Amino acid sequence: MNVKIETGCVLKKGLPEGFVITDKNVFEKYGSLVKGEKFIIGVGEKSKSLEVYGEILKELGDTKRIIALGGGVVGDLVGFVASTYKRGIDLIQVPTTLLAMVDSSIGGKTGINLGEKKNYVGTFYQASGVLIDLLFLEKLPEEEFRNGVAEIVKYGLVFGVPSLERLEKGIFLTDEDLSEIISQCVDYKVEVVGKDKLDKGFRHVLNFGHTIGHAIELVFSLRHGEAISIGILIEMKLGKMKGIFTDEQINVAEKILKKNGLPVYLPVNLDIDNMISLMKQDKKGSLVFSFNEENQEVVFDESEIREVLENG
Ligand code: GLY
C-alpha cells in the first residue's frame, strides 16, 4: 500500500490516468480534474447499493484502473467495484474528506449496503495507491471536517498519538501541524492494517467507539463522527466496569470531544432493545469490545450494556 501525503499532489499535479468515479458534490467542486472517462454517483449512503454497483459495472468496458475520488461512500463502493470487476483491477484512492484521509481510504475495506444492512456485501482489497492532498480540505464543510476529527480523537485515545494534550487544544483546518497529525494517524492505520489485513483480531482496535456509534448512527441519523464521539464515551464507561478506564480518563476524553465540537450525550428517547440488537448485528451476534492494544477482546453481558445505556 503506497500512501502519499503531499499538499497539491492532486489539485496541483492532476489525477493519475484512469476511469474516475466520484459523487455529484465532489464533481461540482473538482470536475475540472477529470479529463477522461467518468461515472458520477448520487451523494450519500444510498449510493452504496447493488443497483448503483451494477450501473457502474456496465460502464467500465476495458478500463484497467479506477480512481475513487471522494469520501467514505465513494471509497467503499468504488473499492468494491475495483475488487470484483474482472476479479480485480487497479485502484487508486483519492480521499477528499478528512475522515477518508485518516481512515476509510486506507486498509482495503470495501462494501455496499444490503438495504438497511450497512456494508453487508464487501471485500478486502488494497488500493495500489492512496493520494492524500490536504488542499481538498479547504472546500470541506465544517461539519464534515468535524466528522474526521472524531476519528483523529479515536487514534489519540487508542494509541496516544496525537497526544491528549494536543487534542485538548482542538483540531482546526488552519492548524500548522494538521498535516503532521494526519500523517501520524495514517501511519498507525497502515501499521495496524499491516498486522491484520483481514480484520481477524488486532485491527478491531480501530473500531473503538464504533459498535455503540454505528447503532446510534443508524437510529438517530447522526453523522458518522458525531455518533462515534458519543460511542467513544459510552464505550469508555463500559470499559470502566472492567477497570480499563478511570473516571479521570473519561473526563479528559469528554473535554477533548467537546473542545473539538463533537457531541458527547446520548440522544433522549433511546430504544435500548433496538440499540442492543443493532450492536449484535454489527458484531455478528457477540458483544465483544476492543478498547486498546492491551484490551482487545473484552466480552460484555447484555445487562452491562443496558446499564451503561440507561445511565448515559
Ligand atoms: N475503519 C476501521 C478499519 O478500517 O478497520
Image (spheres, rainbow, N blue to C red):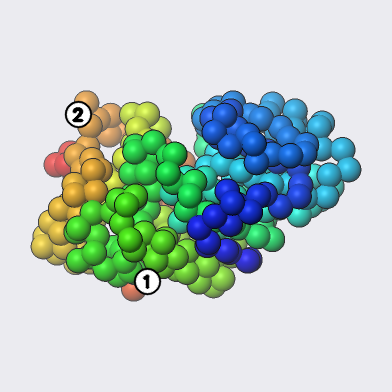
* Quadrant of the image occupied by residue 51: top right
Q: Which mark is residue 293?
A: 1
Residue 88 coordinates in the image, percent (x, y): 78, 52
Report whether the residue tagged 1 is closer than 8 Å to ligand 1. no
Q: Secondary structure at mark 2?
A: loop
Mark 1: amino acid: Glu
Classify the position of the N terminus by image quarter.
Answer: bottom right
Seen in the picture, residue 1 relative to 268 is either above or below; the reply is below
| 295 on left or right of 117 | left
Residue visible at 23% across and 43% down? 261
| 102 on left or right of 227 | right
Q: Secondary structure at mark 1?
A: loop
| 24 on left or right of 207 | right
Q: What is the residue that sits farthest to the front in this orientation?
A: 12
Classify the position of the C terminus by image quarter.
Answer: top left
| 178 on left or right of 54 | left
Mark 2: amino acid: Val
| Residue linked to disc 2 | 268
Residue 296 coordinates in the image, percent (x, y): 38, 66
Residue visible at 33% across and 69% down? 161
Q: CA distance from mark 2 to mark 1?
A: 32 Å
Q: What is the residue that sits farthest to the right in this orientation?
A: 62
Residue 115 coordinates in the image, percent (x, y): 57, 27
Q: Which mark is residue 111?
A: none
Of the numbered discs 2 and 1, the one sitting upstream in the chain is 2
Seen in the picture, residue 146 relative to 240 is either above or below; the reply is above
Count of number-bearing discs: 2
Q: Nearer the viewer, residue 75 or 12?
A: 12
Residue visible at 50% across and 71% down? 191
The reply to whether dot 2 and dot 1 touch (C-beta < 8 Å) is no
Q: Is residue 125 visible?
A: yes
